[in-house]
Amino acid sequence: MKTVAKTPRRLVLAAKRRFQTRLLKWYAAHGRDLPWRKTTDPYHILVSEVMLQQTQVDRVLPKYHEFLARYPSFEVLAAARVSDVQKIWYPLGYNIRPKRLHGIARETVARYGGQLPRDAEALLAFKGIGRYTAGAIRSFAFNEDAPILDTNVIRVLHRVFVARGDPKTQKSKLWQLSEALIPRGQGYAFNQAIMDFGALCCSARTPACAQCPMKTFCKTYPFVRKARESRA
């Protein structure tokens, strides 16, 4: 029976450390200046994360400020009419989101006195908070080393560490990888960094592979380089 050689553990750990170091260095130089990164208020973080679902950052920016000016807290949002919340949400689309956000606000006020819980199990019990949003809240509001896995993170991790197969069928593996890569005590910066890296450098259509700090150990880069050489 033919055996498949495994990558030595020391090489895996070395790649992990290189990725962490280079990612955080890249983020220090290129990270985006976004308003929800200037607060750790769980409510503000929740609003930003719900708005950013399937919506580009430049469309969210003005609406984020407008929404918080109108509904500055869980209590104010919970007391509002759903129809009014939906009106101010326009034109972000995906209109189930304001209903879910309103429901989360009402439950937070009723069950937790207006304070969003930090416990993962409690967060996941809310209708409208999935594993990614729970991780984002724990990481960005409570500074915990909680993993996240959105479209950008999936793309980065799959390209750099996997390369083979369909990432849509490998989410369990990518969740484990996301958690394993977080440097202890740096979940906030690491998660913000990897999302920006996926949006700005390792993008879906036009990744900046030539300038990528991960190209020396990225598992996808050899295929990109070979394709470019064949076209030359």
Image (tube, rainbow, N blue to C red):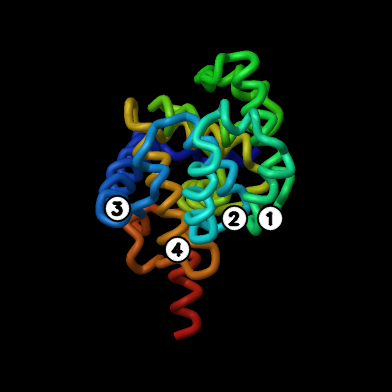
Point out which mark residue 222 bears.
Answer: 4
Kind of residue at disc 1: Gly
Badge 1 crowding class, 10 Å Cα cut-off, few under 14, some 14 to 19, many 20 or more, is few
Q: Secondary structure at mark 2?
A: loop
Q: Earlier in the sequence, mark 3 or mark 4?
A: 3
> Which of the two marks, 2 or 1, is nearer to us in this view?
1
| Left or right of 169 on screen, residue 17 | left
Marks 2 and 3 sit apart, C-alpha to C-alpha, by: 24 Å
Residues 23 and 87: in front is: 87
Q: Earlier in the sequence, mark 4 or mark 2?
A: 2
Marks 1 and 3 sit apart, C-alpha to C-alpha, by: 32 Å
Kind of residue at disc 2: Thr
Vertical side of 229 occupied by 114: above or below: above
Point out which mark residue 26 bears.
Answer: 3
Kind of residue at disc 3: Trp
Question: Do labels 2 and 1 touch, CB within 8 Å?
Answer: yes
Point out which mark residue 55 bears.
Answer: 2
> Which of the two marks, 4 or 2, is nearer to us in this view?
2
